[in-house]
Amino acid sequence: MPEITIPVINAEDPLVPLCNSGELLERGLAVPFDIAHAGQTCRAFAVRFNGRVVAYLNRCAHVAMEMDWKPNRFFDDSGRWLLCATHGATYEPASGACSGGPCRGGLIAIPVTEREGVVFWQAQYPFSPLDF
């Protein structure tokens, strides 16, 4: 299985405010957001797992479909795994690595940081804010 690498925040890349820190409860509902990924508009989500905020494209690694089984719900009933509602693939929340079921690789991580009560995602190749 390929190793999953989480991108590192680089101070030269712009930070985009996502939500207040208090909106992301431990293993709770995700905060969804739209992002441009390699020139396409994609849905993404952020969750809190073991005290840390992580964000991924809302795209199963098995087939590129959105994963939430109810709006903004990605954790399985145990709160241990991120679950694709369509295919049953499970992912490690901290890394996005596939942990079971049908998947090819892992989730695509989006760099995030939390500062002074605000969660930001980082605009860096191949991610950028949407142009309106």
Image (spheres, rainbow, N blue to C red):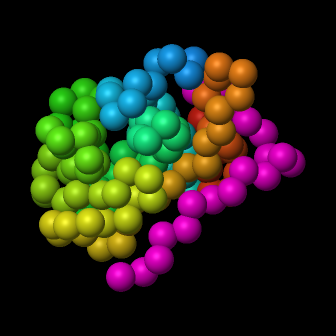
Q: Residue 71: x, y in percent?
A: 25, 27
Please indicate whether residue 12 sits to the left or right of residue 123 in the image: right
Q: In this view, which residue lies farthest toward the bottom?
A: 1
Which residue is found at the position 61% from the left and 42% from the top? Answer: 112
Q: Is residue 64 visible?
A: no
Q: In this view, which residue lies farthest toward the right?
A: 12
83, above or below 75, in the image: below
Q: Residue 47: x, y in percent?
A: 42, 36
- Given residues 61 and 26, the one toward you in this image is 26
**What secondary structure predominates along the stretch shown in magenta?**
loop
Q: Is residue 86 visible?
A: yes
Q: Residue 10: x, y in percent?
A: 79, 52
- Looking at the rendered image, the quarter that the C terminus falls into is top right
- Given residues 36 and 76, the one toward you in this image is 76
Q: Quadrant of residue 8?
A: bottom right
Please indicate whether residue 14 sits to the left or right of residue 91 in the image: right
Q: Residue 22: x, y in percent?
A: 51, 17
46, above or below 36, in the image: above
User: Is residue 9 located in the magenta-colored stretch of the structure?
Assistant: yes
User: Is residue 96 located in the magenta-colored stretch of the structure?
Assistant: no
State which region is magenta.
1-19
- Given residues 82 and 79, the one toward you in this image is 79
Which residue is found at the position 39% from the left and 30% from the top? Answer: 26
Which residue is found at the position 45% from the left and 25% from the top? Answer: 24
12, above or below 113, in the image: below
